[in-house]
Image: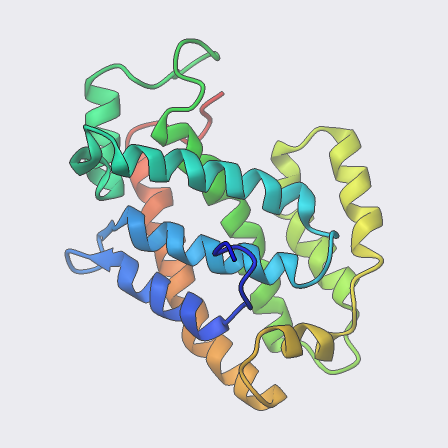
């Protein structure tokens, strides 16, 4: 069974994103970042095909990054900081238009980074929602405030229609395999600050190097 087919565990995602942060929370270990993402893919897959437009892309991006980690320059990809310095310094990033490096580490992580913002917003909305909150509305709001800005109209329309089929809040919480609703809310309360911190560190790094709009 592949890692993306195993049961999702919110606890594992918490540990992965917590383990990401090094150097006084100023840098991110790529291996743990990818492990956190594998958990998020399991979460999305656990809800059926609704999120496949994101999860399939995430799986391919994870694979690209794992290949870099295993490659001859793997040490350069150990952290986001070292990856950015290496790729930018070696002109391995297409900064203004798609060219010779469509699968650069910087571009690949940026795509995951944008999707992470959506999941971060959505999980936070789930955490603070009430039992009768409509998950489709929460998810659409999170999507429209983040990932939708980078998707063409057709994907945005398809996504918002797909969200209408989302299960109720309690079903989401069951998929998280933590326990009672309160236990899920508590663990999300513990996990989300780490996910947010990883997002913020990545955003700051990319902003410093003008990489937030890579083609």
34 or 193: nearer the viewer: 34
Q: Is residue 107 visible?
A: yes
- Determine the residue positioned at 25% across, 22% down: 88
73 left or right of 194 in image: left
16 or 124: nearer the viewer: 16
* Percent position of residue 86, x then y: 20, 26
Q: Which quarter of the picture shows residue 41? A: bottom right
Q: Which quarter of the picture shows residue 139? A: bottom right
* Percent position of residue 130, x then y: 71, 81
Is 117 above or below relative to 112? Answer: below
Is 124 above or below relative to 29? Answer: below
- Determine the residue positioned at 65% across, 63% down: 46
Is 171 above or below relative to 34? Answer: below
20 left or right of 168 in image: left
- Determine the residue positioned at 64% across, 77% down: 173
Is 40 above or below relative to 215? Answer: below
């Amino acid at each position: 069974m592949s890692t993306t087919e195993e049961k999702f565990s919110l606890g594992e995602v918490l540990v992965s994103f917590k383990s990401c942060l090094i150097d006084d929370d100023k840098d991110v270990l790529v291996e743990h970042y990818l492990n956190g993402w594998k958990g998020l893919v399991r979460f999305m897959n656990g809800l059926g095909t609704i999120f496949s437009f994101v999860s399939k892309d995430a799986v391919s991006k994870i694979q690209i990054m794992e290949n870099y980690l295993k490659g001859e320059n793997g040490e350069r990809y150990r952290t986001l900081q070292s990856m950015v310095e290496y790729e930018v310094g070696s002109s391995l990033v297409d900064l203004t238009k798609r060219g010779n490096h469509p699968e650069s580490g910087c571009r690949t992580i940026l795509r995951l980074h944008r999707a992470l913002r959506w999941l971060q917003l959505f999980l936070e909305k789930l955490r603070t929602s009430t039992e009768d909150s409509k998950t489709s509305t929460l998810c659409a709001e999170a999507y429209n405030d983040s990932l939708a800005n980078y998707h063409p109209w057709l994907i945005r329309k398809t996504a918002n229609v797909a969200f209408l089929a989302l299960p109720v809040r309690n079903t989401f919480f069951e998929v998280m395999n933590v326990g009672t609703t309160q236990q899920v809310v508590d663990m999300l309360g513990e996990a989300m600050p780490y996910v947010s911190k990883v997002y913020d560190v990545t955003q700051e790094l990319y902003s410093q190097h003008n990489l937030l709009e890579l083609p």
